[in-house]
Amino acid sequence: MNINQSNIDAFFVGLSTAFNKSLATAPSYYKDISMVIPSATRVQGYAWLNNIPRIREWIGSRSLNQLGSQGFQVENKTWESTIAIKREEIEDDQHGIYTPIFEEMAQAAVAHRDELIFKLLGEEFVQKCYDGQNFFDTEHPVNMDNASLQKTCSNVFGSGNCAPWFLLDCSRPIRPLLFQARRPATLVAKTNLRDDNVFFNNQFLYGVDARYNVGYGLWQTAFACTDPLTPYNYAVVRAAMMSQTSDTGRPLGIRPTHLVTTPGNEHAALRILRSEMIAATTNEWAGSAVPIITQFLLEASNATPVWNAAADFILSQATYGSGYVTTANGQPPSASGGA
């Protein structure tokens, strides 16, 4: 290829086309489990999560409810990835090898959103949410508007001895996580023949940049467990999660839609959620949630070696009483010596 500005610009158009096509079709999960919030400022405030009022019969004047006073802020971050291509490689018609590279750059840009979301999910054991407790915590305060009904609720079970798994309700407008979008990923170039990088270093520069960040949503729409992923423990976590109320005691109608876990739990997750039969009995949990298996959970700063462990603790169970918690061996309390 003759190196002139027209040919270099045409080369960039081809790369941009490949990049944008891959960007649009790259698989991802972040939109499935997080609420995507458009952002127009450097820092976005969220003080409305904890007090969505219930619908009531209209008797007399309207009852005025203030949105939550507790809240948090998410500051947008800027992200980039840049590569340099030698002038000779384009000049010697090596440009064809760069199409898959730029397609992969687009895939990486989309995967980075998943990476941030799932890393944050794993870190929610140790990161505080709007009520001052860790997102996954045994003492979330509820009914704070009524002193006689005040209590604490949990959205985490487990001994901590197994890789974590999470049930999420992603059927609602307010979800467990949020993706704050400020500026989408865009491919840019510094390829003017008069640019310093070309004149001094004989290189054309191509980069991706974007602005966004992630944050926590409503803690009641997520439940974590660090006991084995078994039919019994799965049933107990679902029941506990579906009993959650809002901070003011309003029933939320929680419905778990997704199960997220590490690669080591894939076998157990798929057997529970996809097998019609387990140990010669009907598996009532088949199709009850969408499985998401992701290595990005392992990027959490609090991840331990056990998160990498492979496990299959599938056991056939009958019915379960109310009020139980998960058990360290995944068996019902009658079989494990107590809850």
Image (tube, rainbow, N blue to C red):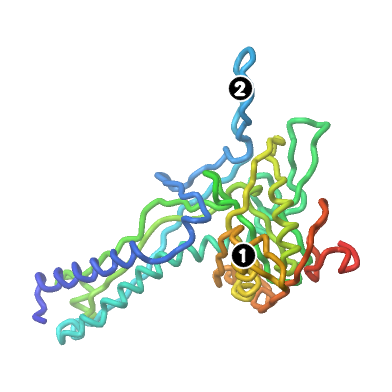
Mark closer to the chain start, 1 or 2: 2
Residue type pointed to by label 2: Leu
Q: Nearer the viewer, mark 1 or mark 2?
A: 1
Q: Helix, strand or loop at disc 2? A: loop
Q: Position of residue 269 (x, y in %)?
A: 63, 69
Q: Residue furthest right?
A: 337
Residue drawn at the location 55% of the way across and 63% of the way down: 118
129 or 279: nearer the eye? Answer: 279
Q: Quadrant of the C terminus?
A: bottom right
Q: Quadrant of the N terminus?
A: bottom left
Residue 31 is left or right of residue 121, and the answer is: left
Identify the residue under disc 2: 64
Q: Helix, strand or loop at disc 1? A: helix
Residue 10 is left or right of residue 285, and the answer is: left
Residue drawn at the location 80% of the way across and 41% of the way down: 151
Q: Position of residue 47 (x, y in %)?
A: 57, 39
331 or 170: nearer the eye? Answer: 331
Residue drawn at the location 26% of the way across and 76% of the way down: 99
Residue type pointed to by label 1: Leu
Identify the residue under disc 1: 273
